[in-house]
């Protein structure tokens, strides 16, 4: 394919380059990230979720609705992005991205520091990624989801919102294990798993089993390529 270059993306495309491994990301405290890594590029993403008790086909408890998105680049991720230089702070930058990407009503659902869940350092990319999670009611979740269709970035930077399945089907593979084999932006997969574990959206045993099946699926996927 002809090299069409990066144009306006030249200065930021390196942050999203593929090939990261799980080990490239180290957990940092929020304070450490802000105080000791202030010269690094910072990015922030948010997970809106609502627990619910719906059982699909009288079989699978869906447990929680989580909002993720299909991005312009074919990767799955959470809404958010890089914090522009000159932006007051990380959450202000994140809320700006959320308004653009999912049309979030900031008067009701804006992200605050207290929603911070975890931060990661990618030393080689000089990048710090912050991750936030906000619980809303199921009615509010539906409202956020529907409003995303009329967000400024819908259809261009964001191709649609999706909900990851949290259950595992009878074959032990389809459902969450298969979902996790998709391609994710940055460390969005690890963030999703971290949130499921720390917000106790699945039991430790169920999550461990899903992760084991996911590893198996990845092995067979890689060996068939
Ligand atoms: O959901 C996510 N979780 C964690 N990292 C992500 C997620 N989405 C994108 N990234 C990473 O965050 C950085 C910023 O990418 P993003 O495309 O969100 O920002 P931008 O729209 O401001 O360029 C890149 O390193 C990308 O790989």
Image: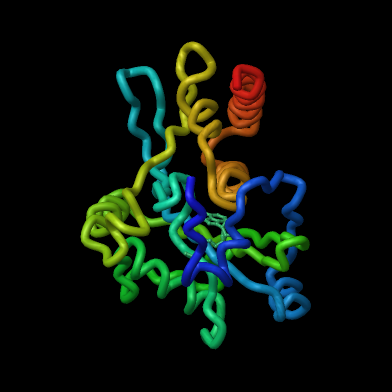
Q: Is residue 34 left or right of residue 99?
A: right
Q: Is residue 78 left or right of residue 196?
A: left
Count of numbered tags: 0
Q: Residue at x 55, y 31 (%)?
A: 181
Work out whether residue 147 or residue 20 is closer to the camera in this orientation and state it. 20
Residue 4 x, y percent position in the rendering: 47, 58
Q: Residue at x 78, y 77 (%)?
A: 36
Image region (quadrant) for ligand 1 = bottom right
Residue 114 x, y percent position in the rendering: 55, 70
Q: Which residue lies most toward the top here?
A: 171
Q: Is residue 61 left or right of residue 118?
A: left
**Quadrant where the C terminus is found in the figure:** top right
Q: Is residue 88 above or below residue 203?
A: below
Tell me, what colour scheme is on the image? rainbow
Residue 184 x, y percent position in the rendering: 54, 44
Q: Is residue 195 above or below residue 127?
A: above
């Amino acid at each position: 394919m002809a090299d069409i270059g990066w144009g306006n993306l030249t200065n930021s495309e390196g942050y999203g380059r593929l090939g990261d491994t799980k080990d490239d990301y180290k957990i940092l405290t929020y304070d450490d990230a802000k105080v000791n890594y202030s010269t690094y590029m910072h990015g922030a993403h948010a997970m809106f979720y609502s627990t619910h008790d719906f059982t699909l086909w009288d079989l699978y408890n869906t447990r929680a609705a989580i909002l993720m998105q299909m991005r312009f680049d074919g990767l799955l991720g959470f809404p958010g992005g890089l914090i522009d230089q000159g932006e007051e702070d990380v959450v202000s930058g994140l809320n700006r991205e959320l308004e653009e990407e999912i049309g979030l009503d900031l008067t009701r659902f804006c992200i605050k520091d207290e929603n911070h869940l975890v931060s990661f350092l990618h030393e080689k990319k000089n990048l710090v990624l912050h991750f936030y999670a906000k619980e809303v009611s199921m009615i509010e979740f539906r409202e956020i989801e529907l409003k995303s269709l009329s967000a400024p970035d819908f259809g261009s930077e964001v191709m649609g919102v999706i909900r990851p399945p949290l259950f595992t089907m009878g074959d032990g593979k389809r459902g969450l294990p298969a979902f996790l084999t998709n391609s994710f932006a940055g460390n969005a997969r690890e963030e999703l798993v971290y949130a499921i574990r720390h917000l106790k959206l699945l039991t430790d045993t169920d999550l461990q089993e899903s992760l084991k099946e996911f590893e198996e699926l990845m092995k067979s996927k890689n060996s068939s390529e």
